[in-house]
Amino acid sequence: MRISSRFTVALHIFACVDVFKDEYKVTSEFLAGSINTNPVIIRNILSQLRNAGLITVARGTGGITVNKPLNEITFFDVYQAIEPVEGGDLFRFHEAPNPACPVGRNIHALLDDKLKAIQGAMEDEMRKYTLADLRTGMQDLLAKEE
Amino acid sequence: MRISSRFTVALHIFACVDVFKDEYKVTSEFLAGSINTNPVIIRNILSQLRNAGLITVARGTGGITVNKPLNEITFFDVYQAIEPVEGGDLFRFHEAPNPACPVGRNIHALLDDKLKAIQGAMEDEMRKYTLADLRTGMQDLLAKEE
DNA sequence: GATGGATGTAATATATCACATTACAACATA
DNA sequence: TATGTTGTAATGTGATATATTACATCCATC
């Protein structure tokens, strides 16, 4: 099971906004063209980013503005905005282990802290990368193209 | 999107085998009773663990033996045996970004190393925990119950 | 204030996957 | 051979990801 493409699409959107915001009006249609998907997919992701307070979308006229300095928005912020992880738990358990079994009634207590540490390690690494890294990285790649 | 319960079920299986192996014949039916699921679900997970070389399952007669010392089997070994992550990449991209767009044709190069680092952080943390930790943890929990 | 382009969102469709269940052949031991 | 178990195929159901159409809402501008 893998993490949905919405997360990388969201990062793609931020990269596009940064690269094209002065040159074009960055609409959902424009973004859909770069990502090669449907504009509604983009709009739904934009809604999630908007609900998380990361961006402002101009209704009617179109266009996206990022609400914070790029180095203050981490990959984790984007991930959290995009991935609706119920209860915040990455790992799923079987719903109803047998309480009559010594292992069944203790399996949660046994695993919870370890799984939390694993999830935390991933999230901590996500916090190390920001949209500012995306900008510099993309600038390097574009410079190399010439 | 969350990681399927098969991973935690697999850990549950190892805990059961360790706790009950001297007292009972640990069959798929027995395990299904503790986990509260269908025996076939268990058998399929056992097949994955067997294919990964972690356990041996006795055909016909039933019963499970672990192939290595518990402290040599990490959570990551179990995770890898269970989660069929195609290409080993946890994060999914949109399949066909637009090559005519400077961002679209560079998005993979831009993100790949960062996503790999994030995935690596999770996997490294998984390598820190072994089935031996499960044993001691479960013994502690059972001791507390008395 | 009417228009046109854009967003927000509902409704629907399809494919994939997780989990469950039945069925049965293959297998090992008594 | 009889019995209990595993291995696995087939099928069903529900959830989720992605795609698409449709349309109401919004806003700058003419």
Image (cartoon, coloured by chain):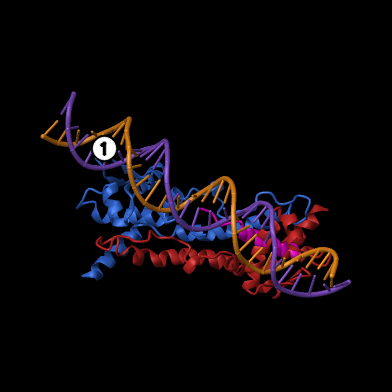
Chain colours: A blue, B red, C purple, D orange
Question: Relative to the observer, which residue lies in front, A74 or A98?
Answer: A98
- Residue in view at x 49 percent, y 66 percent: B86
Place of residue B19 in the rendered image (x, y in percent of width and height, measured from the top left) = 78, 63
The tally of labels here is: 1
> From the viewer's perspective, is A7 left or right of B4?
left
The residue drawn where x is 26% and y is 51% is A30
Q: Chain of mark 1?
A: A
Judging depth in this view, the residue of B122 and C5 nearest the camera is: C5
As drawn, is D18 to the left or to the right of B130? left
The 10 Å Cα crowd at callout 1, few under 14, some 14 to 19, many 20 or more, is: few
Q: Position of residue C25 (x, y in %)?
A: 69, 68
Who is closer to the viewer here, A30 or C2? C2
Relative to A53, A28 lies left or right: left
Identify residue type, mark 1.
Gly
For disc 1, the marked residue is A60
Q: Is residue B102 above or below residue A41?
A: below
Image quadrant where residue B7 sits = bottom right
Q: Position of residue B45 (x, y in %)?
A: 64, 64
- Along the viewing direction, whichever of B70 and B2 lies nearer the viewer: B2
Q: Residue at x 79, y 70 (%)?
A: B61
- The residue positioned 43% from the left and 60% from the top of the image is B92
Residue A67 seen from this side:
no
Residue B16 lies in the magenta-colored region: yes
Q: Point out residue C27 in the picture as x, y percentages from the top left corner.
A: 74, 74
Q: In this orientation, does residue B57 appear?
A: yes
A12 shown above or below C29: above
Residue A56 is one of the magenta-drawn residues: no
Asked which quadrant contains residue C28, the reply is: bottom right
- Residue range in magenta is B1-17
Instruction: Tell me the element at label 1.
Output: loop
